[in-house]
Image: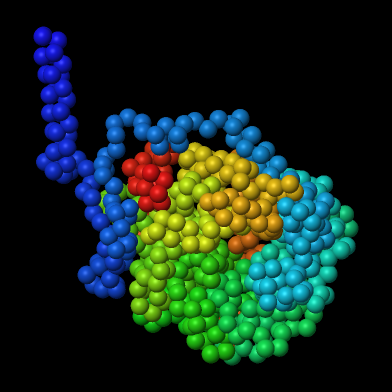
Amino acid sequence: MQWRSLVLGLLLLRLGLHALLALLPALAPGLCLRLRLPFPFPPRSAALGPPGAARPLPGGGSSHWGSLRGGGGAAGRDEYETRYSAAFPPQLRARLRDAARGMFAFGYDSYMQHAFPSDELDPLHCCGRGPDRDDPSNLNINDVLGNYSLTLIDALDTLAVMGNSSEFQKAVKLVIDTVSFDKDSTVQVFEATIRVLGSLLSAHIIITDAKQPFGDMTIKDYDNELLHMAHDLAVRLLPAFENTKTGIPYPRVNLKKGVPPNSNNETCTAGAGSLLVEFGILSRLLGDSTFEWVARRAVKALWSLRSNNTGLLGNVVNIQTGHWVGKQSGLGAGSDSFYEYLLKSYILFGEKEDLEMFIDAYQNIQNHLRRGREACNEGEGDPPLYVNVNMFTGQLMNTWIDSLQAFFPGLQVLIGDVEDAICLHAFYYAIWKRYGALPERYNWQLQAPDVPFYPLRPELVESTYLLYQATKNPFYLHVGMDILQSLEKYTKAKCGYATLHHVVEKTKEDRMESFFLSETCKYLYLLFDEDNPVHKSGNKYMFTTEGHIVSVDERFRNSLWQDILPGEEGTEKVKPNELKAVNFSSNCNRVPDERRYLLPLKSNYMRQIDRMVGLI
């Protein structure tokens, strides 16, 4: 009978301990964070506190947006620390670098073998794709494909960054010898600018760089042909800026005939306001202010139309009336690169007005789009997230975000708001972990894709790369490895890599967009290539919104003209270190050195985000 009494006693002791543990949170609230359910977010008022103050995410009581239990985390290493804080040996990094280069090579070689001189590769049927002549209304295709060997042009500087001088030289000669822009093709001004014009300028800069940091990328008897081609293309795009009452360009232009009759008068903010980097570089290389003038006029016209109440811009505007047709203000499609190019134009050209517009825009974004707790890595509440709101009221318009918004952590890195970037990146990475890709739109309230396709977009990889460069935290190498493995597993096709038609079902579409080679593969490669000249040469580089690499040097900070816009005084230059003095909500100094090899985001907050997207 003694053994029965002993067992009964142990059982009662165990039950007593469980009861005590259950009571601890109530007895000692300081030991854990209390569960708090979110509630609909009201219009901004004084009661909400100063800009950047913690604000809950709207969710109508949806418990998965509530704060996590257990602020301190379990003692010792939990599963997040075990997985992501492990050593990342140089041999593994080298293998992943080679895998990223192999991914690019397979896509590029497949295009050259099966699709060139067409614009794109159909990776399932191993054939080329050009404009849809039978259906001019097929803008998804015709906005991008202009019958000018798009994928070859878009991939030029990736070949250089990967050190493949022989193929770079061969590709440049092919472009010079075979590509013409004298085509009866109606293309989107924005897409032609960032994909084609930007790549031609980037390759020209690489060829003419006296230092040749990527190896010998010079072209025998090169006579600035790529610069002349860029000039020719830009001249063909200029009619889009004519006959608009606001100075905001038409969205599309025919490369041979100009703006089509009965052209649409509505354009998106990003499409019209993200031309300044490429047009500005062209102007400064040519010594001709025309191109920068029209691009800068468009930016200023859009900026003048922002809301007097919130300072926000919408996403679709009428170029003749200046009326906002689309009143959604967000960081994704239709708006994203407008903000990106305000900052990058300043970085490249040093014009003070660009910096001032960006600072103002960033503060308004923090005031009206940001939800969640004030600090990424401390405190209670929902993690930071940027939502879509009405530009005039700041009221929530919907509960989805799109994959293009994943670029924003990378932009935050450039301004030093690394802490906030860490949290937003972690949210998109959690979605990637769930699906092995980013759906085009994700509904954060329903925890499900609204638009389920994934066209091999680079934005999450780009932010991962930039966050690694800012923090040197091995966590981002693990993220890159996950992304690379997912791409190999789910998108690899017979010839190249294919768009995912549905991120849940993993069905494929027969299309490999050119940005897969110009951006996705490039950022993955650079993430793992620690000794790349981009990182080691001593040169300063910036990436365009299409991932084209541009050297940041004095020649782009000097113009041959005094007045950028008529009737205005010459714009004032800003010294590069002046940006550091800007008082954003957080800054680089908030990431201490001792966290370099720890998780960038505490494991309890990572768990919270994983729970939010339905991973756990």
Please report the residue visible at 17 percent of the width from the left and 25 percent of the height from the top: 14
Above or below, 297 against 528 in this view is below
Please report the residue visible at 53 percent of the width from the left and 51 percent of the height from the top: 504
Percent from the top left, x then y, of residue 244? 62, 88
Whether residue 118 appears in this view of the structure is yes
Please report the residue visible at 72 percent of the width from the left and 77 percent of the height from the top: 136
Percent from the top left, x then y, of residue 288? 71, 77
Above or below, 248 against 343 in this view is below
Count of picture labels: 0
Q: Classify the position of the C terminus by image quarter.
A: top left
607 or 270, which lies in front? 607
Percent from the top left, x then y, of residue 8? 13, 19
Q: Horizontal placement of 50 versus 178: left or right? A: left
Please report the residue visible at 32 percent of the width from the left and 30 percent of the height from the top: 76
Q: Horizontal placement of 88 versus 289: left or right? A: left
Q: Horizontal placement of 114 versus 578: left or right? A: right
